[in-house]
Image (cartoon, grey):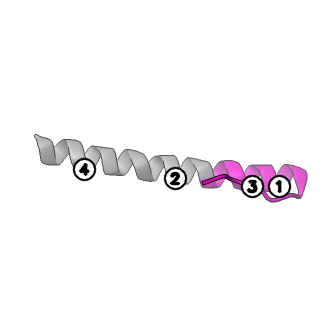
Amino acid sequence: VAGQAHLAARHLERIGDHISNIAESVYYYLTGQHFETFD
């Protein structure tokens, strides 16, 4: 069960990363400026 939860969490993190990349691409497409993050 713990292994499945870890696997699900890892996949959710990757989905979140993909969504962030898509959002940054859309922002650049609409504004012509790069989105600055404060990581």
Element type at mark 2:
helix
Residue 7 numbered tag: 4
**Residue at x 62% of width, y 55% of height:** 21
In three-dimensional space, the C-alpha distance between marks 2 and 4, rounded to whole angstroms, equals: 15 Å
Q: Are marks 1 and 2 in contact (CB under 8 Å)?
A: no
In the foreground, 11 or 2? 2
Answer left or right for 17 relative to 6: right
- Return the residue at label 3: 36
Q: What span is in magenta?
A: 21-39
Residue 29 numbered tag: 1
Quarter of the picture holding the C terminus: bottom right
The type of residue carrying mark 1 is Tyr
Question: Are there few (<14), some (14-19), or many (20+) residues within 10 Å of tag 3?
Answer: few
In three-dimensional space, the C-alpha distance between marks 2 and 3, rounded to whole angstroms, equals: 15 Å
- Return the residue at label 2: 17
Q: Tag 3 or tag 1, which sits nearer the N-term?
A: 1
Q: Tag 3 or tag 2, which sits nearer the N-term?
A: 2
Element type at mark 4:
helix
